């Protein structure tokens, strides 16, 4: 039984990802004794850089400053002398997207049709989000459209899961904005920002025993006691039951975790010889193949950048992300065929190295970010709710308006720390 005189820390934070770091910084400013317990050997969580042999500037995980106009990492970047590229913040808009089919640009007529369909889709969502009932996002797509494969590919990449599994109300709650880039790497920024904190690495939490205002934590690296516990691990980790709670979490909390499962968005990074792509090649591409513009059989979407090296980032969501994890050679073969058909066979000889992510298999996250099942859009409020003023929750999955993002994780960590502070009897 815990007593008042055997607390190691006022607060323990589980997870040194962005939410955990943000919370720690708030507690540090208030001189509140705390520690972060991190299962891996680094900070950053899903902000993860590629190994040096590929280029540590390349982000294996999160890489964009979404909602750049309000994103706190823009200011953090400036304070750490890290440049942010802001002049291509709208590159993901369909107006700016570079559409190709069988190596040729889509016709003006086809582009016009795609933009018109997008507007119809947006208008449907704008009305439907006010309906009392919730449906799957796919319910509002025109599945008979010639361009359905394009919209399905983009929405699957955005959500990390196919649109028939995504709550419309959850999807439409997310705010839109500019998407900025850190060419030197988002993970490098997070690593710098998260330095000088009290973190115990290689310390996986296995069991949490708690009563009101008392917590005992058993880890692979010993036991810890605290008054408050902030849990910032992914829903993938929580749903896997790798952390045992005694007593168990309330039924509503367990249901919320299950109703906000982990999506999978993976990427393939390709480096090319200098000069392969020029500045005018930079941007977001949607490349299609098929008999004609109105008979598309497959779609692949990617970004081309020329700094700090000539490289391409190809995204795969949902089932395709799982395929990449299980059969990377098969997917790389498909990529090579796409590149050959789009840029000519000689571009294949200019590839210098490649790298793939596998977030669904990552032992510390078991997925990329959360998504809401249809009819479960209110569960984010339940997930973020504290228990007996003792167990607190943060992480992108707890954010209704910014889930699936770095800044959402940041906001959640700040919010949770501010909830904890008044509950401490210092």
Image (tube, grey):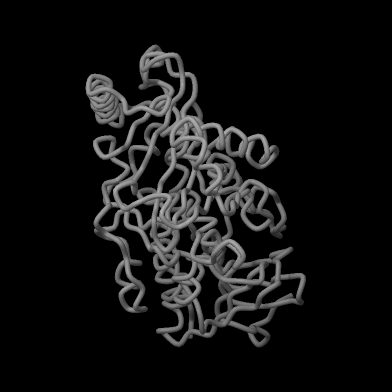
Q: Going by the picture, which residue comes out furthest to the top?
A: 144
| Residue at horizontal 31 percent and vertical 37 percent from the top | 97
Q: Residue at x 55, y 49 (%)?
A: 351
Give the residue drawn at x 26%, y 59%: 86
Residue under the image location 71 percent in, 60 percent down: 246
Q: Nearer the viewer, residue 45 or 400?
A: 45
Report whether 388 appears left or right of 330.
left
Can residue 135 be seen from the camera position used here? no
The residue nearer to you, when weighing 312 against 424, is 312
Task: Tell which residue pokes out farthest to the front in this image.
Answer: 346
The image quadrant that residue 391 belongs to is bottom right
- Quarter location, residue 291: top left
Would residue 187 appear left or right of 172 to someone viewing this image? right
- The N terminus is located in which quarter? bottom right
Residue 425 position (above or below residue 14) = below
The vertical placement of 394 against 269, above or below, is below
Please give the count of numbered marks on the rendered protein.
Answer: 0
The image shows residue 319 at horizontal and vertical percentages of 59, 32
Is 70 situated left or right of 326 in this image? left
In percent of width and height, residue 165 lies at: 51, 30
Of 287 and 326, which appears nearest the observer?
A: 287
* Residue 281 % position (x, y): 34, 46
> Is residue 118 visible in this depiction of the protein?
yes
Up-down relation of residue 399 to residue 284 (above or below): below
Percent across and percent down for residue 117 are 27, 22
Q: Quadrant of residue 224?
A: bottom right
């Amino acid at each position: 039984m815990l007593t008042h005189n055997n607390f190691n820390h006022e607060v323990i934070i589980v997870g040194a990802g962005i939410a955990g770091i943000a919370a720690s910084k708030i507690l540090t400013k208030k001189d509140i004794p705390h520690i972060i317990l991190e299962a891996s050997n680094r900070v950053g969580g899903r902000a993860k850089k590629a190994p040096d042999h590929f280029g540590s500037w390349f982000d294996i995980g999160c890489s964009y400053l979404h909602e750049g106009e309000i994103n706190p990492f823009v200011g953090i970047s400036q304070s750490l002398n890290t440049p942010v590229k802001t002049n291509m913040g709208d590159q993901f808009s369909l107006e700016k997207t570079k559409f190709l089919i069988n190596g040729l640009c889509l016709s003006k007529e086809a582009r016009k049709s795609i933009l018109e369909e997008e507007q119809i889709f947006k208008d449907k969502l704008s009305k439907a989000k006010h309906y009392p009932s919730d449906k799957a996002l796919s319910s509002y797509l025109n599945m008979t459209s010639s361009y359905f494969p394009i919209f399905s590919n983009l929405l699957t990449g955005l959500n990390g899961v196919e649109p028939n599994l995504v709550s419309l109300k959850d999807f439409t709650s997310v705010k839109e904005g500019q998407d900025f880039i850190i060419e030197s790497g988002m993970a490098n920024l997070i690593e710098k920002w998260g330095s000088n904190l009290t973190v115990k690495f290689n310390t996986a939490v296995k069991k949490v025993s708690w009563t009101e205002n008392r917590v005992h934590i058993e880890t692979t690296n010993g036991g810890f006691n605290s008054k408050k516990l902030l849990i910032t691990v992914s829903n993938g980790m929580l749903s896997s039951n790798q952390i045992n709670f005694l007593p168990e979490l309330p039924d509503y909390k367990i249901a919320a975790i299950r109703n906000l499962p982990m999506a999978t968005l993976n990427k393939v990074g390709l480096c090319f010889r200098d000069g392969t792509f020029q500045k005018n090649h930079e941007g977001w591409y949607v490349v299609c193949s098929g008999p004609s513009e109105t008979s598309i059989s497959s779609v692949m979407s990617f970004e081309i950048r020329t700094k700090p090296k000539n490289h391409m980032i190809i995204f795969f969501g949902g089932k395709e992300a799982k395929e990449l994890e299980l059969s990377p050679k098969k997917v790389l073969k498909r990529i090579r065929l796409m590149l050959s058909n789009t840029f000519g066979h000689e571009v294949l000889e200019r590839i210098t190295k490649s790298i793939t992510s596998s977030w669904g298999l990552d032992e510390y996250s078991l997925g990329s970010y959360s998504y809401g099942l249809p009819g479960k859009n209110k569960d984010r409020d339940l997930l973020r709710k504290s228990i007996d003023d003792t167990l607190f929750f943060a992480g992108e999955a707890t954010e209704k308006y910014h889930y699936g993002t770095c800044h959402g994780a940041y906001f959640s960590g700040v919010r949770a720390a501010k909830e904890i502070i008044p509950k401490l009897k210092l």
